[in-house]
Image: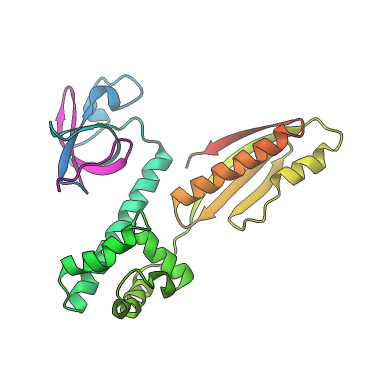
């Protein structure tokens, strides 16, 4: 089946052509080309495209429109945040490492790669969006995560290979927040609002009413989700207690 990216997906590609009207990008994971129209290069005025992209440059873009019948893929560079760029690059690197691991597994056990895909990769894709997520879950919870999903005779060797190849990475996302409360017991209310049992969340006082929040997790996608959930919780709590909160995401 001819595979195309989905609209809204973030993809990595290589700049292969630069024209006055836009840029042609070869998509790494789809063996297809997409185009970034000049209006999607930057949020500002683009006088010269070559000041924004170079030939051979790796870029992270957002898929805006896909028309398989015309073989058209429209992309955007300006709609990709710095954090989304980091997240996509990290996912790509980890997924590439996961595929290399399966190739080595197939070679070591003299198994055709198509069989490894059918018996390992496809079953795991039913539960995990990315292959590396299954491997990271095995690092955390042990080889039992593969039971009932892949052939039993593969589990021990695959798990040992994961242990020798993967390690749990740690990434950080940060935000500053300004928090104020107008109730008589405002200090206690703020403490209750910021309180968390999650070891991945660290809150520090910068100087009243400003605080810093640091999220540490295994990947940017999870870290961003934790930050969003925490900021929503704090905001709701303060809204219910005559207070206000302003979160400002820190870009590295």
How many numbered callouts?
0
Please check the rendered image and state whether residue 44 is part of the magenta-colored stretch, yes or no.
no
Q: Is residue 249 above or below residue 37?
A: below
Give, as a single range, the part of the protein colored magenta. 1-27
Residue sitting farthest toward the front: 148
Q: Residue at x 38, y 63 (%)?
A: 134
Give the side of residue 132 with respect to residue 188, left or right: left
Q: Position of residue 34 (x, y in %)?
A: 19, 35
How is this picture coloured?
rainbow
Q: Tell whether position 20 is magenta.
A: yes
Considering only vertical position in the picture, is 114 above or below 42? below
User: In the image, what residue occupies the spot 47% across and 68% down?
Assistant: 140
Above or below, 129 against 244 in this view is: below
Q: In terms of depth relative to the viewer, which is nearer, 34 or 115?
A: 115
Percent of width and height locating residue 18: 16, 30
Q: Residue 180: x percent and y percent?
A: 74, 33
184 left or right, relative to 129 = right
Measured as percent of width and height from the top left, residue 58 is found at 25, 43
Along the line of sight, the residue nearer the viewer: 118 or 185: 118
Quadrant location of residue 181?
top right
Residue 152 placement, left or right of 246: left
Please tell me in which quadrant of the rendered image residue 166 appears.
bottom left
At horizontal 23% and vertical 43% (from top left) the residue drawn is 13
49 sits left or right of 94 in the view? left
Who is closer to the viewer here, 125 or 171?
125
**Residue visible at 37% across and 65% down?**
135
């Amino acid at each position: 089946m001819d595979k195309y990216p989905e609209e809204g997906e973030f993809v990595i590609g290589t700049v292969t052509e630069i024209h006055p009207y836009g840029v042609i990008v070869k998509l790494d994971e789809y063996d297809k080309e997409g185009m970034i129209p000049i209006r999607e290069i930057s949020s500002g005025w683009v006088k010269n495209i070559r000041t924004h992209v170079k030939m051979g440059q790796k870029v992270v873009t957002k898929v805006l429109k896909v028309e398989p019948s015309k073989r058209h893929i429209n992309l955007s560079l300006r709609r990709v945040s710095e954090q989304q760029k980091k997240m996509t690059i990290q996912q790509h690197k980890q997924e590439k490492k996961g595929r290399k691991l399966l190739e080595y597994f197939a070679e070591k056990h003299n198994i055709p790669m198509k069989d490894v895909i059918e018996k390992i990769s496809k079953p795991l894709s039913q539960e995990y969006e990315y292959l590396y997520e299954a491997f990271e879950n095995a690092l955390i919870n042990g080889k039992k995560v593969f039971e009932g999903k892949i052939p039993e005779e593969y589990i021990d060797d695959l798990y040992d290979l994961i242990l020798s190849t993967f390690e749990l990475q740690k990434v950080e996302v940060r935000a500053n927040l300004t928090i104020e409360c107008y109730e008589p017991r405002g200090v206690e209310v703020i403490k209750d609002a910021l309180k968390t049992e999650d070891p991945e969340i660290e809150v520090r006082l910068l100087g009243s009413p400003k605080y810093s929040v640091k999220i540490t997790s295994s990947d940017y996608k999870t870290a961003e989700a934790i930050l969003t959930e925490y900021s929503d919780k704090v905001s709701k709590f303060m809204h219910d207690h005559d207070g206000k909160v302003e979160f400002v995401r820190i870009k590295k």
